[in-house]
Image (tube, rainbow, N blue to C red):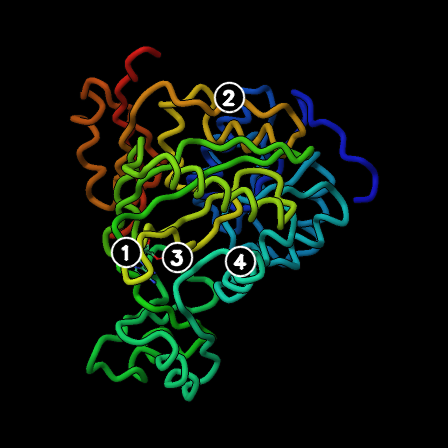
Amino acid sequence: MSDAPRVIAPGMVVGILGGGQLGRMLATAAAELGLACHVYCPDPRSPAFAVAAARTIAPYDDPEALAAFAASVDVVTYEFENVPVETAEALAARVPLAPGARSLAVAQDRLFEKELMAGLGIATAAHAEVSRQADIYSALARTGRPAILKTRRLGYDGKGQATVRAGDDPVSAWRVIGEAPAILEALVSFEREVSVILARGRDGEVRAFDVTENVHDAGILDTSTVPARIEPELAAEALAIATRIAEALDHVGILAVEMFLATGHEGRRLLVNEIAPRVHNSGHWTQDACLVSQFEQHIRAICGWPLGDPSRHSDAVMVNLIGDAVADWPALAAEPGARLHLYGKSEARPGRKMGHVNRVRPRPGT
Ligand code: AMP
């Protein structure tokens, strides 16, 4: 779109590509600002549909459905990064898209992500590209063992990954990931994992939430805690790294940057693991511990509104409710200091994110 984007005012319509829990929470936040959401998702059972003003159930490559969707919305965003770039570009030719297609293209390919970091002088785990079976040996020479083979695309929550330890046959790791184009990464020994969730407005203003400390279990986020146990200088460095990435992408909206606080012969340092051009599970605590949540902040940014105040009034621990853990909902609903968020998914399959709980404690003096 060449003309200057207008402010998306209350009463106008935000289009969301993707209908998962992130889309559901974005649509709820948009509704609280008087905006309506039109959710586009191929899956008729999408959790976001229940809270959306309008829905389209169609594949992402359906030109007629996309044209009708574009005609019915004032701005388009996405809630997951595996939306095809061509879909995003086709929409961007008709209606403002935020974040832009470049953020999407980089975030959906682990090699592009690493190349962006290298170009910005931002440290990552040692890695090498693996496009065919034979590459795995030269890649291992670069990373050493243990290492993790990860598909370049479509991996999430630890899926599409295989570890190569001393004595393992690397070819079986290549088979485990389906012989798809991949990168091999050195296994980082880390003290903890942290993430930065920031918003960048259309005017380039950046506002970040406090750095979050994350614990994963089997590749899936388990808990996020604020404040993170890192020194203020490292927290400032984490924010500076994330800001540089957002600026390089000319990103508009929420950007999440996951990092390792690595230990080892090069000392304690931050290594970027991956980025997400969207609201992120490690930012769910903002719903109950900040004046403005990541969901509202994303809507504000993409609609050209002033960014909200991201300051934190409470300490918080977010715990994901995965699979059967959601059966504890009656006890969680009764727990003092806890706020329960459920996604309305009917079937609690193992590994499926069903909801989360934010345990908050007001900060002294706030
Ligand atoms: P990812 O899908 O890349 O976010 O990986 C999911 C989780 O697996 C991360 O949050 C880490 O806990 C772990 N992990 C991924 N890559 C590495 C690595 N190179 N070294 C150590 N742990 C890793």
Q: Which residue is mark 2?
A: 309
Residue type, numbered disc 3: Tyr
Q: Which residue is mark 1?
A: 263
Of labels 1 and 2, earlier in sequence is: 1
Label 2 CB less than 8 angstroms from ligand 1: no
Disc 4 target residue: 121
Which of marks 1 and 3 precedes in the sequence?
A: 3
What residue is shown at x 47% (from left), y 44% (from top)? 256
- Type of the residue with mark 4: Gly
Which mark sits nearer the N-terminus, 2 or 4?
Answer: 4
Determine whether 178 is above or below 190 in the image: below
Towards the viewer: 18 or 165: 165
Secondary structure category for the residue under label 4: loop
Check the image and report above or below for 212 versus 262.
above
Q: Earlier in the sequence, mark 1 or mark 4?
A: 4
Q: CA distance from mark 2 to mark 4?
A: 30 Å
In the image, taking residue 144 as reference, residue 18 lies left or right, namely: right
In space, the residues marked 2 and 3 are separated at their CA atoms by 30 Å
Tell which tag, 4 or 3, sits nearer the viewer: 4
* Gap between marks 4 and 3 measured at Cα: 25 Å
Return the residue nearer the eye: 42 or 238: 238
Residue type at tag 1: Thr
- Is residue 231 or residue 309 the one in the foreground? 231
Ligand 1, seen in the image, is in the quarter at bottom left
Q: Quadrant of the N terminus?
A: top right
Q: Specify the label residue 156 is tagged with.
A: 3
Q: Residues within 10 Å of mark 3 (few under 14, many from 20)?
A: few
Q: How far apart, in angstroms, are the residues tagged by discs 3 and 1?
A: 25 Å
Between marks 1 and 2, how big is the CA–CA gap?
34 Å
